[in-house]
Image: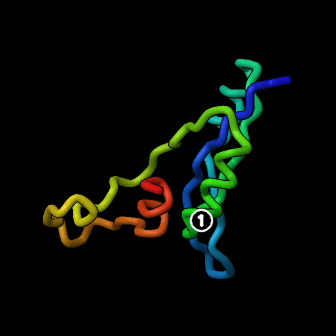
Amino acid sequence: MKVRIGVSCGLMYTQRAALNHLDIGYSKSLLANDALPLILPILQDPALVDKVLDQVDGLLLSGGADISPLLYGEHLMKASYRYYERRDTNDLL
């Protein structure tokens, strides 16, 4: 059985919907190394996150925009920079 790697994804907003998204390179790299990538949706419930993580053998945090410094008790460097609170919260669970 292949090792199952959970991969965090980002959010992309269109006029119609909010979409989970992940650069295909992550999946290709894991598959090329005999691992099964399982794309993890953004969840807000810690209990549900725990249940999902129980189903994988490893975790790859795919990265994305910077995490908001407010989560670390720091000030924003640029007021105009966009942070993604839902993703930040999910990745820190």
Q: Residue at x 62, y 43 (%)?
A: 7
- Give the x, y percent position of residue 46: 55, 63
Q: Secondary structure at mark 1?
A: loop
Q: Residue at x 65, y 59 (%)?
A: 41
- Give the x, y percent position of residue 18: 62, 73
Q: Residue at x 63, y 56 (%)?
A: 21
Answer with left or right where residue 87 lies relative to residue 52.
left
Quadrant where the N terminus sits is top right
Q: Looking at the image, can residue 36 be seen?
A: yes
Q: Say which amino acid is labelled 1.
A: Leu
Q: Looking at the image, can residue 12 be seen?
A: no
Answer with left or right where residue 90 lies relative to residue 21.
left
Quarter of the view holding residue 33: top right
Q: What colouring method underlies this structural image? A: rainbow
Quarter of the view holding residue 68: bottom left
Q: Nearer the viewer, residue 24 or 87?
A: 87
Query: In the figure, 41 relative to 36: above or below?
Result: below
Q: Which residue is mark 1?
A: 43
Query: In the figure, 16 relative to 72: above or below?
Result: below
